[in-house]
Amino acid sequence: MSKNCLGSLTERIQVSRIVYLRQFKKEIWKDGPITLAVIKEENYHDEQNKNNILKLRKVLDTLPPFCRDFFRGIEPYTSTRTRLAYAYDIRLFFEFLHETNSFCKKREITELPLSVLDMVQRTDIEYY
């Protein structure tokens, strides 16, 4: 351990010719005259994404298993906030089906098969 010019503690590790310095929330890689710094501070956006992902996982636990495939498919093209909003809407729709559809009443929402979507009629969607 050593102190750098700012007085903070760093840990120096020699890896081949590259020197890796680990500081509080910052990585500094030195290779001769070249210095690369990677700042690992989380900003508001990153924190919100993590929170939204945790919320999404909880909502997905209340949905049929085939819904996970849908959310996995849209992940690269949508934000975490969008996926969370979709999950809330889909859960609300399945709760509606569970209350009004005779087939869905017999099962828990998490046990509904994909084929239940084939049974959804235009009137079900209109009533919803």
Image (cartoon, rainbow, N blue to C red):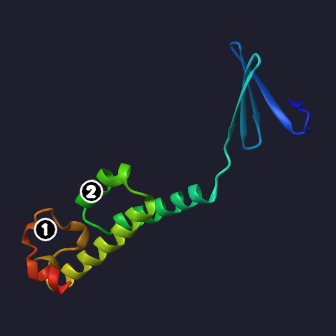
Relative placement, left or right, of 61 versus 14 is left
> Dividing the picture into quarters, in which one does residue 82 lie?
bottom left
The numbered disc on residue 70 is 2
In the picture of the structure, the residue carrying the numbered disc 1 is 117
Question: 8 and 57: which one is in front?
Answer: 8
Q: Where is residue 95 in the image (x, y as percent from the top left)?
A: 26, 79
The numbered disc on residue 31 is none
Three-letter amino acid code at the position of disc 2: Phe
Vertical side of 114 occupied by 109: above or below: below
Vertical side of 95 occupied by 33: above or below: above
Relative placement, left or right, of 116 versus 95 is left
Q: Position of residue 38 (x, y in %)?
A: 67, 37
Q: Residue sitting at 38 percent across and 68 percent down?
A: 59
Q: How crowded is mark 1: few (under 14 residues within 10 Å), some or many (20 or more)?
A: few
Secondary structure found at label 1: helix
> Dividing the picture into quarters, in which one does residue 116 lie?
bottom left
**Residue farthest toward the top in the current orientation of the protein:** 17
